[in-house]
Image (cartoon, grey):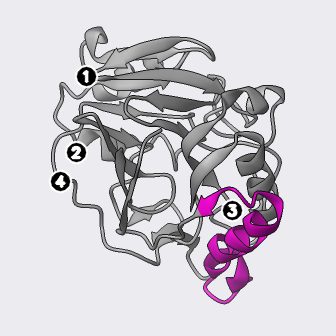
Amino acid sequence: MVELTWHGHSTVWIEDSGTRLLTDPLLRDRLAHLRRRRGPTPRLPAIPDAVLVSHLHADHLDLASLRRLPPDTRLVLPAGAAPLVQRALGASADRYTELAPGEATTVGEVTVTAAPAAHPAGRGPWSRHRAPAIGYLVEGRARTWFAGDTGFFAEMDSLGPLDLALIPVGGWGPTLGPGHLDPQGAAEAARRVAAAWAVPIHYGTFWPIGCDRVRPDRFFQPGDDFARHAHRISPDTRVRVLHPGESLTVPGS
């Protein structure tokens, strides 16, 4: 059994076998030109046993949010990301675990394995910091895939079967660039990984200032669109569309 709370965007609280994980924490209501438009400011129920960071983009690796966690909170990062984070947070190197696709670490009672992802590796257009984007496979009483931010990749079919897939179905703006999944593509991803349950993430939380009325369908509809496409493309997958702050319990295999 796995218990989760979606706090919006790619921030998910996951509990499996008594182990508490937090993905891509974005724990504040404003990031540069983005503002939280749905859901409450995240209030974590406890200190996570580890934080899983999928890639360097500021809406996934938010250093200000990491500073809100206790300074000894373990961080699991893509290979090559630790120097950037350590320079910003100034913590001991023992705090960091770097993983490349296929590499694994143990956190409490679960195994965390880095999965491939198809997404830009840089911090931003003017940054020299780079680390290949990854997702994570969490294995305890259930098998959970946190996809991070990704397009299709060749190894996707080999990840399943899964009890739960946390799949990005959109973004934070009126368009999607390469390295993303739209609702129909996310439904195909759920089919490829043979997910028993799927929860859409990475949409409907943050929106650029001044763009409230620009393509509102890109903000509100991706979760429901994903559920509709999954019913057709991956009929064996049960989809639960959550609002930011809502929780779900999924049985394990």
Q: Distance between the residues labelled 4 and 3?
A: 27 Å
Residue lying at the far bottom of the rendered structure: 213
Closest to the observer, 150 or 34? 150
Q: In this view, does 82 lie to the left or right of 124?
A: left
Q: Residue at x 32, y 47 (%)?
A: 65
Any magenta on residue 147?
no
| Mark 1: secondary structure | loop
What kind of residue is marked 2? Arg
Q: Mark 4 points at which residue?
A: 45
Q: Are marks 4 and 3 in contact (CB under 8 Å)?
A: no
How many C-alpha atoms fall within 10 Å of the one at disc 3: few (<14), some, or many (≥20)? many
Q: In which quarter of the image is residue 231?
A: bottom right
Q: What stretch is highlighted in magenta?
A: 211-238
Q: Which amino acid does label 1 sit on?
A: Gly
The amino acid type of the residue labelled 4 equals Pro
Q: Earlier in the sequence, mark 3 or mark 1?
A: 1
Disc number for residue 68 = 2
Image quarter where the N terminus lies is top left
Check disc 3 and report the residue beneath it.
170
Disc 4 crowd, CA 10 A, few/some/many (<14, 14-19, 20+): few
Q: Nearer the viewer, mark 2 or mark 3?
A: 3
**Residue indicated by mark 1:** 108
Cα–Cα gap, marks 2 and 4: 14 Å
